[in-house]
Image: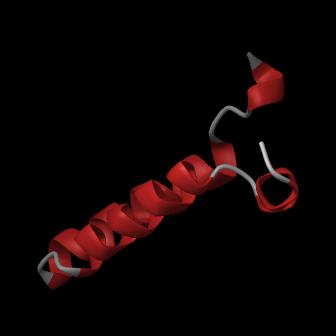
């Protein structure tokens, strides 16, 4: 693991996140609103690595 990956994090995870966000942005408006609401809920109340 190089120093940049240590500072920034895993690039594969970031790539998958950007691909997910692009898929959500391509959804019709009503589906996109629902997907973003679920995402907000999970990011706010979801489990973290420390909870496992």
- How far across and down, in percent of the image, does residue 17 sit? 47, 60
At 85% from the left and 51% from the top, the residue drawn is 6
The answer to which image quadrant residue 14 occupies is: bottom right
Q: Nearer the viewer, residue 9 or 34?
A: 9
Residue 4 located left or right of residue 43: right
Is 49 or 18 nearer to us in this picture? 18
Looking at this view, name the residue that lies furthest to the left: 28
- Residue 22: image quadrant is bottom left
Q: Closer to the camera, 17 or 8? A: 8
Residue that lies at the very extreme toward the front in this rendered image: 2
In the picture provided, is 37 more to the left or to the right than 11?
A: left
Q: Quadrant of the C terminus?
A: top right
In front of the other: 28 or 22 = 22
Check the picture and name the quadrant holding the N terminus: top right
The residue under the point 24% across, 69% down is 23
Side (left or right) of 46 relative to 26 = right
Residue 39: x and y in percent read 47, 58
Q: Is residue 50 above or below residue 35?
A: above
Tell me: residue 35, above or below residue 9.
Answer: below
Determine the residue positioned at 11% across, 80% down.
28
Q: Residue at x 73, y 34 (%)?
A: 48
The quadrant in which residue 34 appears is: bottom left
In the rendered image, the residue lying farthest to the top is 52
In the rendered view, does 24 fall on the left or right side of 9? left
The total number of labels drawn is 0
Q: How is the image coloured?
A: secondary structure
Up/down of 41 relative to 33, above or below: above
């Amino acid at each position: 693991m190089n120093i940049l990956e240590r500072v920034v994090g895993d690039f594969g995870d970031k790539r998958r996140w950007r691909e997910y966000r692009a898929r959500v942005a391509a959804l019709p408006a009503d589906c996109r609103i629902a997907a973003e609401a679920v995402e907000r809920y999970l990011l706010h109340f979801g489990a973290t690595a420390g909870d496992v």
